[in-house]
Amino acid sequence: MGIKRRGQVDLTRLKNCMCRAEKGEKLTIGFFGGSITQGCLATEHEKAFSYRVFQWWKDTFPQAEFSYVNGGIGGTTSHFGVSRIWQDLLMYQPDVVVVDFSVNDKEGEDVFFQETYEGVIRRLLSCQSKPAVMILNNVYYDSGINVQECHNEVGDWYHIPHISIKDTLYRRMREGAY
């Protein structure tokens, strides 16, 4: 893999969105990824991680007005994501985007998927609304496999914050904490 630059995570866009929410402005919270993002195994729509994050924004900033856009489609990779990002997410001009293809992008095809994933990230960062982008690295719960190293290298290059389920909740679940 060619991407190596590391540096400080840039939280400027996220902080700006939080300031706007504190002022009571309207914001669009978007999600982009595969079936986990879509919420396909959630027992009900409101229990999907995407909706729970959206609900956090509403609860934390009740003075603001929020719109929810879920661009999760089961079985899709970042390769397909690059081609569908406009109609499934960017046309709504999101202010915050959580992106997760770490389960659907295939292990062992890191170079290919790193390039297509970077395409998704570049499209997000160049969107007219200049959204705050966060990378979520979910995990196959039976094996713990994901491609977070590949995706996080892209995030590090662009100074985007990333969250790892594998290194946090999954590890605690395997230890019997949940």
Image (cartoon, rainbow, N blue to C red):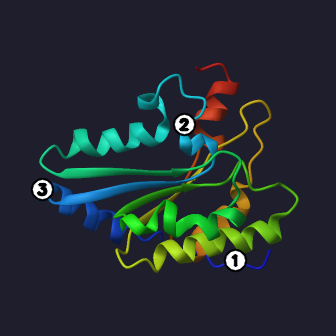
Q: Residue at x 48, y 38 (%)?
A: 49
Quarter of the figure with the N terminus: bottom right
Residue 4, percent from left and from top = 69, 77
Secondary structure found at label 1: loop
Q: Are marks 1 and 2 in contact (CB under 8 Å)?
A: no
Residue 163, percent from left and from top = 54, 51
Q: Nearer the viewer, mark 1 or mark 2?
A: 2
Can residue 7 be seen here?
no
Left or right: residue 54 compared with residue 140: left
Q: Residue at x 12, y 56 (%)?
A: 24
Instruction: Residue type at mark 3: give it.
Output: Gly
Instruction: Residue type at mark 1: give it.
Output: Lys
Q: Quadrant of residue 174?
A: top right
Residue located farthest toward the front when viewing the structure as drawn: 87
Q: CA distance from mark 2 to mark 3?
A: 28 Å
Q: Nearer the viewer, mark 3 or mark 1?
A: 3
- Is disc 1 surrounded by few (<14), some (14 to 19) or many (20+) residues within 10 Å? few
The residue at which mark 1 appears reads as 4
The residue at which mark 3 appears reads as 24
Tell me which label, 1 or 2, sits earlier in the chain.
1
Of 73 and 148, the residue lying toward us:
73
Q: CA distance from mark 1 to mark 2?
A: 32 Å
